[in-house]
Image (spheres, rainbow, N blue to C red):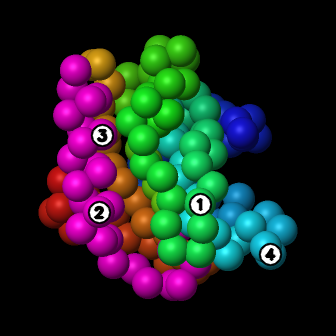
């Protein structure tokens, strides 16, 4: 699913991403709010949003982070950078080891493709944390 209403907004910091994705998450049906989501935000060279894609809708406590799916639209749209983000329905604001490993894998794939992975942001309904700000990438 590609979300068009946020196209052309400039991303200045992780808080901008969190606000957008929290609004999207809160607008969903309650059943889906209780599942992990993985989004990819494609950015141009000036960090203006070209697209926001829901890449994966998972279960209560996990979602699939597959590089092929994350980069598919990024390649098609010709973006310079991406930001990946996911939510924790539990409210836990800690990145798991699996999250960190998956992000490292995405960064390596991005290097090969010439697409930067600027950040991985974890959101809850009312808070967020950034891997970049936490020094995890």
Task: Using the numbered discs, state the Cα–Cα distance from disc 1 to disc 4 in whole angstroms.
Answer: 14 Å
Q: Secondary structure at mark 4?
A: helix
Give the residue displayed 21% in from the left and 26% down from the top: 111
Place residue 94 in its image quadrant: bottom left
Q: Which residues are magenta?
A: 87-112
Q: Secondary structure at mark 2?
A: helix
- Which residue is identified by label 1? 58
96 over 119 or under it: above or below = below
Which badge, 1 or 3, comes first in the chain's sequence? 1
Which badge, 3 or 2, comes first in the chain's sequence? 2
Q: Which quadrant is home to the N terminus?
A: top right
- Which residue is identified by label 2? 98
Q: Nearer the viewer, mark 3 or mark 2?
A: 2
Q: Is residue 96 left or right of residue 54?
A: left
- Which residue is identified by label 4? 30
Depth order, front residue of 41/31: 31
Residue 34 in the image, given as x and y percentages of width and height: 67, 75
132 over 77 or under it: above or below = below
Task: Using the numbered discs, state the Cα–Cα distance from disc 3 to disc 2 in whole angstroms.
Answer: 12 Å
Mark 1, other Cα within 10 Å: few <14 / some 14–19 / many ≥20: some
């Amino acid at each position: 699913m590609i979300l068009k209403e946020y196209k052309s907004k400039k991303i200045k910091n992780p808080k901008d991403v969190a606000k957008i994705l929290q609004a999207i998450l809160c607008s969903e049906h309650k059943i889906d709010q209780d599942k992990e989501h993985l989004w990819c935000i494609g950015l141009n060279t000036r960090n203006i949003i070209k697209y926001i894609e829901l890449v994966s809708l998972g279960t209560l406590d996990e979602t699939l982070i597959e590089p092929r799916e994350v980069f598919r639209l990024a390649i098609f749209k010709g973006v310079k950078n991406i930001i990946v983000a996911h939510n924790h329905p539990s409210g836990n604001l800690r990145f798991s080891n699996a999250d960190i490993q998956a992000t490292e894998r995405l960064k390596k794939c991005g290097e090969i493709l010439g697409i930067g992975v600027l950040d991985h942001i974890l959101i809850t309904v009312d808070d967020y944390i950034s891997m970049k700000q936490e020094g995890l990438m």
